[in-house]
Image (cartoon, rainbow, N blue to C red):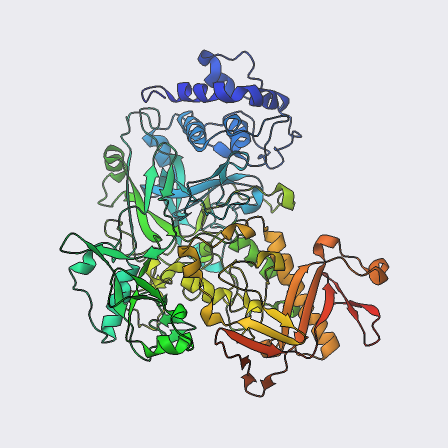
Amino acid sequence: MNGSSSITEQLWETWQRLKLHWAPYFKSAGLDLSGVTLDDFRERLTAPIKDMKRGVPGLEDLPPQSRRGIEPGDPALSLFYHALASPHVHPSQIESRGENYPTVADLEIVENFVYAAAGMTMEKLREKAKGRELAIAVFAYEYAPAEDTIHGLHADLCFSRTGISRVGNAAPHYEPQARGFFPYDEGSPRAHVVPARFGAFVAYRQEGRRGSVGPLDFSDGDGELRFWVPIHKLFRGPECIQGFDLDLHFEVAHVNEKIRKIHLQLQSEKAPADWKPEEMAGTPFVITEELASFCQSQGLMIPFVHDPLVAPAKIDDAKGDWKYVGFQVPANHDLGESALWLDKDANTRSSPEFVHIRYKIDEKDPKQLVYLPDTTSQDIVQVLKNGGFKAANFVDWTADGYIKANCPALAEALKGDTNQTMSLAAYSVVAQPDFFPLVTQRGLTAWWKETPAPLKDLIWPDRGVVPSPLSDNRLPANVTLKGAAFDGADSTISAIVGTPRPLQPAATPLKLTREQQPRRQSTLSYRSSSLFDPGWDIAGSSLAPDTAKGPAFMANYGLGSPFPEDTLICSALGSFWPGAAPDITRFFSPNSLPTTTPILDSEANWPAVKAPTVTGNSIDYQALTYADFVKALYEGQFNYARFARVSLSDYILRTKITARFYQFLQATEKLDATDPTQRLLYVITSFENGKIPAQVQGKWTAPAEETFKIRFGKAQNVSGNGFHPRTAPNPRITTTEVDSLREVYVGQSQAAYQNGSGNWNVLALP
């Protein structure tokens, strides 16, 4: 497309490709574009629609005040934009091929047209700001359905100064119908890169306002904080703001310094200094290249594709050759299962919490790696505890960084008489792949808050750790990022704000069925979990990490190295940190926490985790210390896609069914189900959807998709001080004896079970 063409000409060219399928849809909604020419295209789009048909499928959450195809300066009020951008609009008989739906670049053009139509001037900008300070600010943003907006009334743009893209070993996979990206293809084990969308806006700063600019999920303290709120999108050329021919460029930088932080932490513990400071200044200790790049024509931050997703770290030596990067493992160091546990008691993280140490650099041939579990019949934990070998570091290409918009002429004009820096960077997080791309942390949190206390007590441990999205977090971005100029006092950077709207009464948002959920992954902060300890996508750090005051800012380097090491440990502990990760607790012998959201039997066949073997009343488990997500990812044997279609409602249902199972045990086994240690007494060997027995069909009310068959038994090798699983001659296996294995069918309000006579009973659950 000609860079000198007008915004109208660019949109006209896009329309020529889309109009075959979309013109009939717009006509049915009242926007007749038949016979339109380039000369009257702009006028037809911005003219009032005399008879808008709001009953057309896909317009259910179009704002009721919408009156035009394009409402100047307001995409959400624009019928034309809503139809093209909403994942719920699908013209009848449209072919699903990508060229029949708008691309991300197309939506950029439509948005630019909307803002160009406003005829914005500096005077209008200052009027919109009502005397408040103005700045150029970069935001991550998306067009969200009503249920995910600040006000909950209709579809709208949502903005955050934190955007989360995700690494992958395959190129981005755009889902045209969903108007977004999805990390998995059916039947493929690969994880596709998920880009995050960013744009530059003129923004003003104001106190939080519930139901209007937000932030999303407004808390009591937000009224005292000041949030940056976008009011006008910026794009190149003379049509954005009158009197300016904007020369807009973006500055982008990311860094992964996990390996450097590991070595510095070990040196602070008096471990041998294997590398000199000057050697640790570049790759792979500090990685700044091939992490993510910004495509301005699409507004996308796109992580680089890396296959495999994790790999041993290498460095070029002085002879023009290479060698592996590693470190001497100290003897008797703290371990988390079979990972090195750094800074165990820290309130904030100055280095990765867990480090993979199962690959040894061969002493005789330093270009060879030895996988330690394959070299010994001794318990691998003891081998790692003994230390004295050089463990290979692994690179994972996650990162954090910033994106800043540079537009000098406009910045100078906005500055006025102040000395304030008028270009604010957004925080860009390049995170690990997501197991459950359709499960948002905000959705999980909302359900948790609505769940009655008796059921809550049977889910996550009662230790003050409850679901929380990153958008609710109030910490600044990584202040150590050079060039970002993040303000250590700005705790609002991960919040989600909206377009200023008049305060309106609360409304019931559009509720979507599982089938209506768009097949796309959000990259805004409400999708991600909060920090926990440390977190899934980002961690907390501070300039004084031993402080008791808690995290001072967000940083990537506090997560596990590489990321699968941390993921495994948390997943195997009953989703101890309540985020959307696979709960694989039931595939290991009873440890310290009961399962909360078990994965299905059909999801369990993967090399990293082996399902237990049941022989009579004896269950042989793979020892957790021999499960290895890092090895599986490195060897290309790890399949994320098995969870790709699990919706938020599916995930919540599994969690509720498990809690109901514990209620069943409480009623039939006299179990104190509020005590996690008592719930640990009962081991689950099978968890699947199941058809209820014919004997109870007339009494059963739950639909088949909400009925689960659970096979379980009560562990016998237990004493007053905990479990004592019998260790087989092979240390890779632990064995738990159960009294017997039984089956129960569990729904959301009932359980069906056999009594001592073999007859089936139905129990109503509270």
Left or right: 175 with respect to 663? left
**Quadrant of the image containing the N terminus:** top left
The spot of residue 249 in percent (x, y) is 28, 35
| Residue for point 39% across, 22% down | 7
- Name the foreground residue: 119 vs 444: 444
Is any atom of residue 766 visible in this view? no
The spot of residue 311 in percent (x, y) is 34, 55
**In the rendered image, the vertical position of residue 763 relative to residue 171, given as above or below:** below
Place residue 505 in its image quadrant: top right
Place residue 344 in its image quadrant: bottom left
The spot of residue 650 in percent (x, y) is 62, 54
Left or right: 710 with respect to 170? right
Place residue 337 in its image quadrant: bottom left
The spot of residue 739 in percent (x, y) is 69, 79
Is any atom of residue 732 visible in this view? yes
| Residue for point 47% across, 45% down | 213
